[in-house]
Image (cartoon, rainbow, N blue to C red):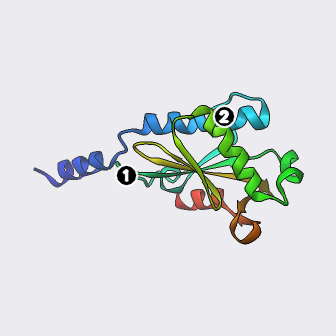
Amino acid sequence: MTVNRDFTLFLGNLQIKNSDTISGRYGSITRSLNLYFRDSDSRTNFSIQAGSYGRHSGINGISDLDMLYIIPPAYWDTYKNDPARLIDHCKTEISKTYPNTSIKRDRNVVVVSFQDFVIEVVPVFEWKGKFKYPDTYNGGKWRTCDTRAELQSFK
């Protein structure tokens, strides 16, 4: 065996084998939230694949996937004083698409537990190029992250 062949084999072993399934489930979750918040059946608009999968640094066997879903700004007044309510509404809508899947709220995410991996959905509001996300701990508040900058930096 040559170093080139060994390295090619190594890289092949790291490639995510179930990316079609992962993308399909991301799309279904996005669609369910788009139907509720935008009356749209888009499977791609207003969601961002984040974490190692979104950075393209995940490897085969990845078990935890992160997704940001951008809530329309018109809903800010509805949720600004009750971040938990936003997570609960997202959980309810995702449950309509996956009624037989374990779905729960966990501090600032909706955890969708499939048999082979988990998708953590973070509902966010876009604010001056960054994102405000809910934190339900200790009465609830909003925190800020810059996921696009993180993804771009890693690229």
Residue at the limit of the structure toward the top, as seen here: 41
Task: Name the quadrant containing residue 82.
Answer: bottom right
Left/right of residue 56 with respect to residue 149 in the rendered view: left
Left/right of residue 133 with respect to residue 112 in the rendered view: right
Kindly identify the residue that appears in the image at 46 percent across and 42 percent down: 114
Provide residue 20's location: percent of width, then percent of height: 44, 34
Kindly identify the residue that appears in the image at 70 percent across and 64 percent down: 135
Residue marked by disc 2: 32
Kindly identify the residue that appears in the image at 13 percent across and 51 percent down: 2
The disc label shown at residue 59, or none: 1
Mark 2 crowdedness (10 Å alpha carbons): few <14, some 14-19, many ≥20: many
Residue at the limit of the structure toward the bottom, as seen here: 138
Can you see residue 44?
no
Question: Helix or strand or loop: what does disc 2 sit on?
Answer: helix
Kindly identify the residue that appears in the image at 18 percent across and 51 percent down: 6
Provide residue 133's location: percent of width, then percent of height: 71, 59
- Alpha carbon separation for disc pair 2 and 1: 27 Å
Q: Nearer the viewer, mark 2 or mark 1?
A: 2
Question: Helix or strand or loop: what does disc 1 sit on?
Answer: loop
Can you see residue 6?
yes
Mark 1 crowdedness (10 Å alpha carbons): few <14, some 14-19, many ≥20: some
> Label 1 sits on what residue type?
Ile
Provide residue 154's location: percent of width, then percent of height: 53, 60
> Label 2 sits on what residue type?
Ser
Q: Compare residues 18 and 93 and report the one nearer the observer.
A: 93
Q: Are marks 2 and 1 in contact (CB under 8 Å)?
A: no
Left/right of residue 140 with respect to residue 96 in the rendered view: right
Nearer the N terminus, badge 2 or badge 1?
2
